[in-house]
Image (spheres, coloured by chain):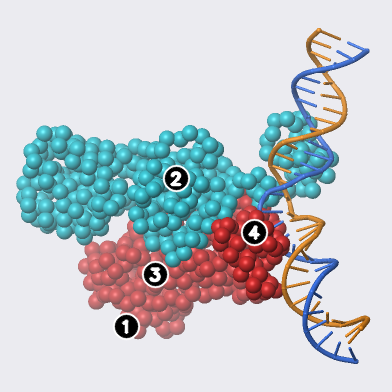
Chain colours: A cyan, B red, C blue, D orange
DNA sequence: TACACTGCAGAGAGCGCTCTCTCGCACCCG
DNA sequence: CGGGTGCGAGAGAGCGCTCTCTGCAGTGTA
């Protein structure tokens, strides 16, 4: 072992490896030389056992949602997480939460394998981490809707504010009949973006009529198209449209065009997400960008701080930006 | 501890938890009752230290390629892996291999943290695992091109054979001037799919001229479009086209159509991958499907067998299938 | 000169398991 | 009835670290 090679005790080696200050410089050098000579790699497992730290962070992905891999938002989030963790000793543990056996996930999380967890796409039905209580530091991506977890730490974009600012942009363009296609109302993104639209429209002093210019979709392109059909039937004089995500916005644009509306001349459209295809639409879609990588970075940073016992605000908000393209 | 609660020794608890046979049934019951009563979760870390197993499998994703998350092929591969691992005690460790610090990856892998590794999208420049030699069981997704690793275990689709069969389908349709848009020649998929085309064309008894009907792209849609322009210029009488992936096929179809060629009447087109957008093209793209989930499952199974010390063939081939749609 | 104080390194006891070794206890056979 | 056989359970030694506790110099103070 290194201790023998360097002629010191194992405790001293440990001190050097872990960067303790109270070791004489020449001894540090000796030990480091020995480490290099022997190509010594500390055994992480033994260290964990002794130090009662795992140096592991779990990234929990609900199985049903492992389609999130295909979600253009998810990849950069993971990269952001990985980037932050890359500068630390933490290791990322991908946990595909099997819904068939939520017990397994829970046990794993409380088995001391993990110092903390990142929950990446939770839906209201998932209760596997509820049992954990506050035993394990956890950070959610997006405001947790699950009862009993609503007060947990999370990172989020300010959907309300972002939506409001998008709608204000439409209003600033002189549009007076600004409708919205809202998303699923069981998800924060669906709820909050609708609220943002409401706030802006209400503040604009538009009449009651405008506040009714809302139709609902489920975030898919087709649902956006259908919702737009309905909206157009009710409000042929629509001149602005805020859509809760880009997928639905694509559907909306299709329908608007097929009804002879020019975008943005007749109807200005703003989406949300800045999906990869947004710039390829005709006209290119003006939309709200969520900086996904920073989102992931923030999640990791908050969790690390939490594990370190620091006091972190429950909610971390990542600012969005309005990407102006052709559609508004 | 459980031992006291059940009135047996710790060794016996260990035996029960690990399913050893040589424990009397009533004692097993006693211990299990105690385990349930105390909600005992074995400490995985201590177990690892003692048993010199980690029960962890690393999934290595090169950082530059962490865009693979966005790759529609990658998500189901991970799901397949997770599915197989879900039935075992293994845990998936996502390792974003930082290219800036390949040392970190290597050290981690040899630090006893991991029983084996899955390498998911390796490119020829990546050498971080070469140093590992055969110390760690590893399974590659796709034939390893990296010098020194070419003989390692891997799971692959038979690109040569799949391509050959696709081209034979074109030939069977009565096409006689079947060209190809080949992919990057530093990747197995690029090399092998070209070989498959060559084999089929050569076997068809077509003349020298046909064997020259190849242009190269880099797997992107635009490169596919450009390659098709070149090919069309050289061979206006082209009546069949095999494209090494769907992205490039989409580009090719765009160009063919803009040159007034009807698909499939004038030129029949076959792609490769069966990307999600393939059925949405006009006409829907006939393409070679790779069963990605099975791919992941196979990778996990091979690795587990390898770790168990079983004798596994170096190469596991996942069969592909030709999905016939409108374009050929 | 005696004593307290500080800084640094070693000793050694764990961390919570696994696993080998050993022993006890039936059971069976000659 | 004694000793061999075999199975089941306990004892106890690690696994490779960390971390507290202790001891030993060396320095400062009265």
What is the CA distance from the residue labelled 2 to the residue labelled 4?
36 Å
Q: Earlier in the sequence, mark 4 or mark 3?
A: 4
Q: Which secondary structure lies at badge 2?
A: strand
Q: Quadrant of residue D3?
A: bottom right
Q: Is residue B135 above or below residue A317?
A: below
Q: Which residue is mark 4?
A: B5
Q: CA distance from mark 4 to mark 3?
A: 60 Å
Image position, residue B202 (x, y; %): 45, 80
Q: CA distance from mark 1 to mark 3?
A: 18 Å
Spatial separation of the CA atoms under disc 1 and disc 4: 74 Å
* Mark 2 or mark 4, whichever is nearer to me: 4
Rendered-image quadrant of the C terminus of chain A: top left
Same-subunit check for callouts 1 and 4: yes
Q: Helix, strand, or loop for circle 1?
A: loop
Same chain, labels 1 and 2: no
User: Which mark is in front, 1 or 3?
Assistant: 3
**Which residue is disc 3 drawn over?**
B272
Q: Quick check: can you spot residue A190? A: yes
């Amino acid at each position: 072992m290194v201790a023998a090679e360097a002629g010191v005790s194992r405790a001293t080696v440990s001190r050097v490896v872990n960067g303790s200050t109270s070791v004489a410089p020449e001894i540090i050098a000796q030990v480091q030389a020995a480490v290099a000579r022997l190509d010594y790699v500390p055994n992480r497992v033994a260290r964990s056992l002794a130090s009662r730290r795992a140096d592991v962070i779990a990234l929990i992905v609900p199985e049903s949602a492992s389609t999130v891999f295909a979600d253009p938002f998810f990849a950069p989030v993971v990269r952001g997480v990985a980037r932050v963790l890359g500068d630390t000793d933490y290791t990322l543990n991908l946990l595909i939460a099997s819904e068939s056996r939520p017990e397994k996930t829970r046990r794993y999380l409380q088995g001391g394998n993990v110092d903390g967890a990142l929950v990446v796409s939770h839906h209201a039905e998932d209760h596997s981490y509820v049992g954990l209580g506050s035993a394990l530091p956890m950070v959610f991506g997006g405001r947790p809707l699950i009862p009993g977890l609503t007060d947990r730490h999370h990172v989020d974009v300010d959907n309300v504010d972002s939506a409001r600012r998008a709608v204000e942009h439409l209003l600033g363009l002189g549009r007076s009949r600004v409708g919205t296609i809202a998303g699923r109302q069981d998800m924060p993104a669906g709820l909050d973006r609708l609220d943002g639209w409401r706030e802006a429209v209400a503040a604009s002093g538009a009449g009651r009529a405008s506040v009714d210019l809302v139709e609902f979709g489920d975030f898919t392109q087709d649902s956006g198209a259908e919702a737009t059909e309905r909206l157009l039937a009710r409000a042929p004089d629509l001149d602005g449209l805020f859509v809760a995500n880009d997928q639905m916005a694509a559907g909306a644009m299709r329908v608007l065009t097929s009804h002879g509306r020019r975008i943005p001349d007749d109807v200005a459209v703003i989406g949300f997400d800045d999906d990869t295809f947004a710039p390829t639409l005709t006209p290119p879609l003006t939309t709200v960008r969520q900086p996904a990588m920073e989102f992931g970075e923030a999640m990791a940073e908050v969790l690390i701080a939490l594990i370190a016992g620091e006091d972190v605000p429950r909610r971390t908000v990542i600012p969005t930006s309005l990407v102006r393209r052709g559609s508004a």
